[in-house]
Amino acid sequence: MNAKETKAGVASFETSMKRLEELVRQLERGDLSLEESISSFEEGMKLVKECTAVLGQAEKRIQHLTQEGASVTQAVPPADEEERGGGELPF
């Protein structure tokens, strides 16, 4: 892969996507040999699988954070209510 890699040695999502786009362009040009085309297709499928897994993990993280945020929001009273001292009148 390219120089932009994560600590684990796995290419970043962005790098993988750029490589995938490059492979697609090469395949669409149609000037690769059959063996090169198959090899490029194989690499592309591997990248698609990796990118899909990364996106799945990101989606899980976002759902978790959203659920955490929703529970925190429900536990905290609105700011104007808190400033007035709960149910007291503002004057």
Image: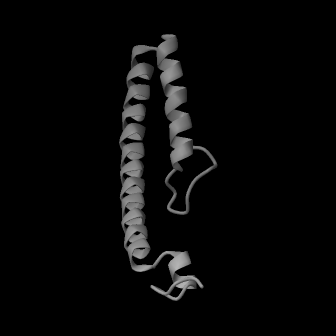
Q: Nearer the viewer, residue 36 or 50?
A: 50
Residue 82 makes an appearance in the image: yes
Quadrant in which the N terminus appears: top right
- Residue at image position (39%, 53%) is 59
Please determine whether, in this image, residue 44 is positioned above or below residue 37.
below
Q: Position of residue 64 (x, y in %)?
A: 37, 65
Residue sitting farthest toward the front:
91
Q: Position of residue 14 (x, y in %)?
A: 55, 44
The colour mode here is: one colour
Q: Describe residue 81's horizontal placement relative to residue 39 as left or right.
A: right
- Residue at image position (51%, 41%) is 16
Q: Describe residue 72's horizontal placement relative to residue 14 as left or right.
A: left
Residue sitting farthest toward the right:
3
Q: Position of residue 33 (x, y in %)?
A: 45, 14
Residue 42 falls in image quadrant: top left
Q: Position of residue 55 (x, y in %)?
A: 41, 48
Total marks in image: 0
Q: Nearer the viewer, residue 2 or 66?
A: 66
Q: Nearer the viewer, residue 64 or 6?
A: 64
- Residue at image position (45%, 85%) is 87
Residue 32 makes an appearance in the image: no
Quadrant in which the C terminus appears: bottom right
Residue sitting farthest toward the top:
30
- Residue at image position (43%, 69%) is 69
